[in-house]
Image (cartoon, rainbow, N blue to C red):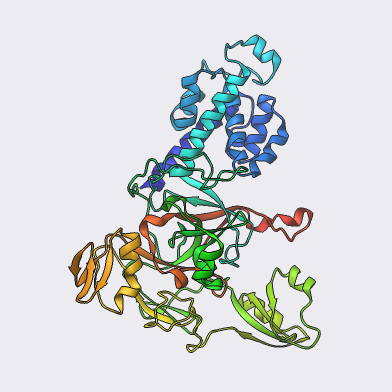
Amino acid sequence: MWYIIFAVLTIASLYGLWLLFKKAGKQGWEAIVPFYREYVMAQLTARPTWWVVLLLVPIVNIFIFYGLYLDFLKCFGKRRFWETAVAVLLPFIYLPLWGRDSNVRYLGPSNTEEFRKKYPYKKSVAREWADAIIFATVAASLIRGFLIEAYMIPTGSMERSLLIGDFLFVSKLNYGPRVPMTPLAFPFAHHTMPVTGGKAYSELVQLPYKRLPGFQEIKRNDVVVFNFPAGDTVVLEHQDQTYADMVRYMGKEAVHNQFTVVTRPIDKRENYIKRCVGLPGDVIAMEGAKLMVNGQPGFTPPEMQMDYYVYTDQSGLNPERMKDLRLEYYPTNQPDIFRVFMTADEAEVVKAWGNVKSVEMGTLDKSQLLGDTYPHDNHYRWNFDNFGPITIPAKGWTVSLDSLSVPMYARAIRDYEGNTLEKRGDGYYINGQKSATYTFKQNYYWMVGDNRHNSLDSRAWGFVPEDHIVGKALFTWMSYDENGSFLSKIRWNRIFKGIN
């Protein structure tokens, strides 16, 4: 239903722009082509056409778009405060009305001295820019908070489904927009102030979790953006690294002794993106690196990466060749053996190289215990490739409390659902009351990266609560390859590519 409403409102807005473009002497279809539309607007308003390039720059593009859009409306005499407000907040109503109004006509390029003299208006240039910035900020904040938001992939945990340098649009509407829990925040900043650093939000006002109606429930194998559930963040030389990741490699004591540990509100924690392989009530397991869901083989992403051990002759691997193929690799303590992260198809390509003797997947044996697998308890001697079965909590599900279940669900009971949990001589106590069972208040999910051997995910920190869910990844609108050169830095084949 929400899809239909959103589509109708979008079509109505574009229809209004179509009519206004025709009044300005342009073709109506030019109003519905992204980037080209803004190029035409720049021509019609006498703004520099090179501004269109700035639409590729996150945050800046918001101000450029609204600047051109409001300048375009000024060409039709729409300069009053209420006209600017409805143009930003209710374009699906007022653009068609103005487009069909015979009294509304194109007056000429609004950003010229001739236009200002012919159609004088008391508002100063500074006031016009201030109004545009304010409206752009309000509109963009509403869009970013409740409709759609842009994200960038910073790590390779979803390779090759998503690549480092992919810029995504993430829909808040699919699962329902989450009402901001920390509403007092600097616009467009997540948790840290740009340039100056420091907190970009205030905790003076904290709202309870509330999600508006969405188009759909989370489906198994959706690619989902969520707030990092473990919560803690280690601040190291102004770079944020997850607490769980640091503990995994350094140990908890070393982390606490050397670094500053901070805790943020749920909606200000780091944004993660993974594939949801387990829904509330599902039973998840991993057997020999093969995902099992409810006793059946789980989804295998077509471009899923694993790590492989590549055995070569003494010449090793050619760094330039590996760079050309965008293969992430590491030497081992033996000069002729390399650890390479790649897909099954890429492994077949590498296997055919003349200096490669063999290629073996680096699957962990059940006996290889690294101490990095949830729930980090001696009762569960697991690793990332062999664990489970684990039942994912669902809202209303009741679990018996004992020495096996408590390590598995203690974090959810205590940290995610706000209870105290104690073990005493005669049993378990929740909020001071002896309890033999616990009934969960919200749904939980199991998130795993497509780069199965190079991803910190639910296998390390467990369940993702419903109140941590941000939105569904829709498509890549831009993809930048830092290892490319000149035009090859843009991955043209990934622009507007859907995410499956």
Q: Residue at x 53, y 65 (%)?
A: 257
Residue 124 versus residue 237: which sits nearer the camera?
A: 237
In the displayed orientation, state which residue is furthest to the front.
257
Q: Residue at x 23, y 62 (%)?
A: 431
Task: Return the x and y of residue 341 as percentages of the image width and height.
Answer: 63, 75
Q: Residue at x 60, y 65 (%)?
A: 156
Does residue 477 show up?
A: yes
Q: Is residue 270 above or below residue 454?
A: above
Residue 115 versus residue 108: which sits nearer the camera?
A: 115
Task: Return the x and y of residue 467 as percentages of the image width and height.
Answer: 37, 55
- Relative to 162, is 445 on the left or the right? left
Q: Is residue 158 above or below residue 495?
A: below
- Relative to 265, is 455 on the left or the right? right
Task: Return the x and y of residue 392 as percentages of the image width and height.
Answer: 34, 70
The quarter of the displayed image where residue 152 is located: bottom right
Task: Return the x and y of residue 53 as percentages of the image width and height.
Answer: 69, 40
Q: Is residue 336 above or below residue 485?
A: below
In the displayed orientation, state which residue is furthest to the right.
315
Query: Total of numbered circles in the picture?
Result: 0
Residue 217 versus residue 99: which sits nearer the camera?
A: 217
- Relative to 252, is 334 on the left or the right? right
Q: Residue at x 65, y 38 (%)?
A: 36
Does residue 23 show up?
A: no
